[in-house]
Image: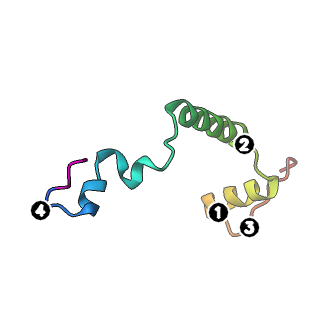
Amino acid sequence: MPPSPSPRRSLKEVCHARGHSFVSILPAKSKDDELTLFKDMQKYERDNFLLEATEDFDESICKAHKYYRCNLSPFL
């Protein structure tokens, strides 16, 4: 005959042992997966860092220098 649980503990307390918590149900990402994702994001950011539309670039220069009218023609 199996031993009965202690009268001080309820069945809920007995079943909630260290290995049976909610956290152990969720799959944990391995460090290799996280490192791969991090490296992919770094590569994506590095590749797209200097890719801006020329209109946006021209506007950002005008705003940075606080010019009301900005003419960036190569002939001036």
Asked if the stretch drawn in magenta spans residue 19, the answer is: no
Q: From this viewpoint, which residue is outermost toward the front?
A: 1
How far apart are labels 3 and 1 at the CA level?
A: 10 Å
First-in-chain label (4 vs 1) = 4
User: Hey, which quadrant is residue 62 in on the image?
Assistant: bottom right
What stretch of residues is rendered in magenta?
A: 1-5
Instruction: Please name the residue that numbered disc 1 is placed on.
Output: 63
Q: From this viewpoint, which residue is outermost toward the right?
A: 75
Q: In the figure, is residue 9 to the left or right of 34?
A: left
How far apart are labels 2 and 1 at the CA level?
A: 22 Å
The answer to whether the residues at label 4 and label 3 have Cβ atoms under 8 Å apart is no
First-in-chain label (3 vs 1) = 1
Kind of residue indicated by mark 2: Asn
Kind of residue indicated by mark 1: Lys
- Looking at the rendered structure, the secondary structure element under dot 4 is loop
Instruction: Please name the residue that numbered disc 2 is placed on.
Output: 48
Instruction: Please name the residue that numbered disc 4 is placed on.
Output: 8
Residue under the point 57% across and 34% down: 33
Residue under the point 61% across and 64% down: 66
The answer to whether the residues at label 2 and label 4 have Cβ atoms under 8 Å apart is no
